[in-house]
Amino acid sequence: MILPKFSVRQDNDRVYVTIHVAHVRTTSIELDIDGDQLKFSASPYYLRLTFPGKVVEDEDSNAKFDAGTGDILVTLSKQTPGEHFENLDLLTSLLATRREQANVATNVARPLIEEIGTVDNSGGIDELLERARIDEDFDWEMPQQLDLGELQVGSAKYGFNQQYTGYLTHVHSTANEINEVVDPDHSTPDSRRQHRIACENAKFDQEYYMENYLNDEDIQPLIKHPLSTDTLLDPEFTATEQQTMVNLPSKTLLISNKQAVYLGMVDLLFAYSLELRSHLGELTIESAWAIGAVSSTLSNLEQFSTLRETCVASYRRGLAYTLYRHWDLCERAMDDVRVICQNGRRAILKVFLDLKRVFDEHDVYYVYSKLFLDDYCVWLQVGASDEVLKSLADKLAHIEVEQEEVEWDLDALEDRVLMSSDSEAEEEEKEEEQEEPTRRPLIEML
């Protein structure tokens, strides 16, 4: 069966579903309303939507087919008039089944063999969703250690929620210039981290940093450039974004380490924000590589355990791998991350949909959409919490990364630049004093 294009909107009393189907017979169209679900079928199309609230068929409910456009407009009445259905524009969440929503909410995997009569769901979906809110008051500075004892040689896990393996087996035979992990499928989180830090130390260029610090005429406009508000203020998704959400893989995401998922999100948002700010709000043909190189999540399959280490790693890579390597530029990019998080998961989802577009269009780096971005786009719709994001934004507003934390003695480098600049200025001043022009006498001797 084919999943048709669709969109959903609402007013105070009704929900409107527009379904686009081409060349179908009206006699084959079937609609079924069951509480919070709408089921539509018209061979070869099939669509099932699960709403946040219940709908009913009454005298105001109807379905109209426009043969010219191929659109079917389904009008459904809300069981409780005036109720606002949240997140109707997050199309992937509407496609999830009731069981998938319950599994995501409770973060409990369905057993391979289920014993009938042993599961008590008498509380219904509301109780399950309420239970899901428990344990989301994160301490962003409390490390959550990985159980390295469970890792076996040749079975390394990486990607979103550490759930993939085998995707990067032949990475070194491709033109992948983002990856820095020597042997991804035989690595451990600890070995990847150690290698990442070693690569950053080798990549950092003192002369490059001092040059950018001293001659920052081209960098200051990037720092002062205002953050684009299109993503933050426009709550509507474009038709392209909606179609991307519909085309996302249908899966249940059972998160084993929620805090690590949020921190990986921060890492990716920083890389995206820094690249966007480095080109005055525009992305370029090299942006997939540039974002991937700055992101520890993509380049080294990193999984962070605290917010501070996430920020420090972001600054290190922002000072070692980018076109412009300036401390103030990194700080401004991290503040962009704070603003985006403060505006909630819709703003973040728009960023990740754009990230997915950038990586999908690359003939090598599309693999990172499969490993990370697809799942982040699904999770932001069905699993991320606006309350947690606000907590994260508040923490970002108060966290300050010190230059000593990147371990490259940046203070000394900046002092050296200033001393050298002062010395050059003094030398030029002396030369100017010594080169005073000789005055021509008023009367020349013949």
Image (cartoon, grey):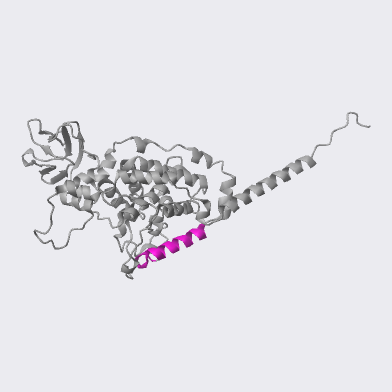
- Based on the displayed image, in which of its 4 quarters is residue 39 positioned? top left
Residue projecting furthest to the top: 442
- Which residue sits at x=59%, y=46%? 214
> Range of the magenta residues?
183-203
The answer to whether residue 283 is visible is no
- Foreground pick, 417 / 102: 102
Q: Main secondary structure of the magenta part?
A: helix
Q: Is residue 436 left or right of residue 300?
A: right
> Quick check: is 195 in the magenta stretch?
yes
Say how many tags the image has.
Answer: 0
Q: In the image shown, does 277 or 283 lie closer to the viewer?
A: 277
Q: Which of 92 and 242 is in front in this view?
A: 92
Q: Where is residue 66 in the image (x, y as percent from the top left)?
A: 14, 33
Task: Say which of 135 and 327 sits in front.
Answer: 135
Q: In this rendering, would 85 be left or right of 302?
A: left
Say if 255 sits above or below 429 in the image.
below
Task: Answer whether residue 391 is visible to the viewer in this image.
Answer: yes
Image quadrant for the C terminus?
A: top right
Where residue 119 appears, as percent x and y from the top left, is: 13, 57
Identity of the residue drawn at 32% across and 63% down? 157
Q: Which residue is drawn at 48% across and 62% down?
A: 198
Q: Which residue is drawn at 14% across and 45% down?
A: 48
Give the residue furthest to the right: 446
- Residue 382 lies left or right of residue 269; in this view the side is left
Q: Residue lying at the far bottom in this picture: please name it.
A: 153
Magenta run includes residue 229: no
Residue 195, percent from left and from top: 44, 63
